[in-house]
Structure formats: C-alpha cells, structure tokens
Image (tube, rainbow, N blue to C red):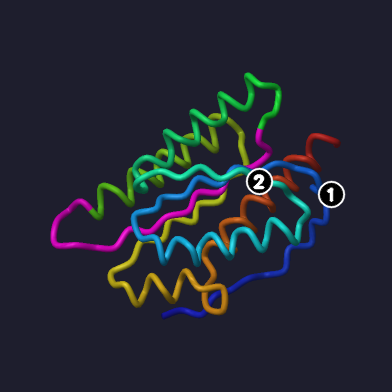
Amino acid sequence: MADARRAALKDQTDITGARALIVEARFYDDIQDALLEGALAELKAAGVGHDILTVPGALEIPAAVAIALDAAESQGKPYDAVIALGCVVRGDTIHFEIVSMESSRALMDLAVSRKVPLGNGIITVNTDAQAWARARAGELNKGGDAARAALAMLRIKRRLARA
C-alpha cells in the first residue's frame, strides 16, 4: 500500500463559524463510526459546525446531499461545505463498481454544478481489513481526509470571493 501523503496546506483563510453537512451511509456501522470520528475531529479543530444525515448506503448519499442543500438554502441557512462518508466493499458481482463509480460521479456533479466544497470520504475497498486501515484515525483516516478536503475547498471559495 502506498504511504499517505498529506502536504500541509498553507491557506489559512478564516472559516470559523461555517456549517458543514455530513451525509453518512450506515451500511457498515462500525467502519462508519471510525470514518465519522475522523471527520468530526477535523471540523471541531477548524471551528466548523455540522449537521449529520444518515442514509442506508453509498448510492443514496448524493440524493440526500442535493435534498439537504435545497432545504437549507430555502430556509436561509445554506451549508458551506459537504462531507460524504461511506464504505463499499467489493463482492462477487459488479454491484461494487456501480455503487463506487456512480456515487463518486454524482458527488462530483453536485460539487461542480452547485459550487459546493465537497470532500468524498466514500472508501472503496476489496476487504474489511482494507476498510479498517482507511477508516481508523490512527491509520489512513479517510474520514478526516474528506473533511480536510472540504475545508480546504471552502477556504479557497471564501478567499476568492473576497478577492
């Protein structure tokens, strides 16, 4: 497995008080707990509040994000960033490819069309052992990585909006 490379990001644009939406797929509860722990730690460290929506699986994440973005906007409380968390483990059929590719494609479509900072923390793995290695905060911490990605994009969005 390749070593994780986390370059320090130099952008320190203030994002305290921002609101993030976490949409998590609870198909694998124990792995999801670890992903969520990593994401929440990053949000807390950045001073960013959050709401959590839970959906059955990774394919439901993009639709839930779209629904929540619309609802928050109509209530005058838009989300500043989105974090998608889930786990897809390869099985014996092509369902793995459909779920992993379509959820990622739909999330990218949302991020670009809505111009919303989004961190994709849906891990796609061959085995439970790989899932654990990616989910745990002491290891690859992909939940934390997804939150950091969303926050980095939020900093860029805020910095450029002020320019």
Identify residue type, mark 2. Answer: His
Q: Callout 2: 10 Å neighbours few (<14), some, many (20+)?
A: some
User: Residue drawn 54% across and 59% down?
Assistant: 36
Q: Position of residue 78 (x, y in %)?
A: 67, 30
Identify residue type, mark 1. Answer: Asp
Quadrant including the C terminus:
top right
Residue 28, picture quadrant: bottom left
Check the image and report above or below for 127 versus 1.
above
User: Residue drawn 54% across and 61% down?
Assistant: 143
Q: Earlier in the sequence, mark 1 or mark 2?
A: 1
Q: Position of residue 48 (x, y in %)?
A: 74, 50
Q: Nearer the viewer, residue 11 or 107?
A: 107
Q: Callout 1: 10 Å neighbours few (<14), some, many (20+)?
A: few
Q: Which residue is mark 2?
A: 50
Asked whether, in this view, residue 149 is left or right of residue 160, the answer is left
Quadrant including the N terminus:
bottom left
Q: Is residue 11 magenta?
A: no
Check the image and report above or below for 109 versus 152.
above
Q: Which mark is residue 14?
A: 1
Question: What segment carries the magenta color?
Answer: 79-95
User: Residue drawn 34% across and 47% down?
Assistant: 57
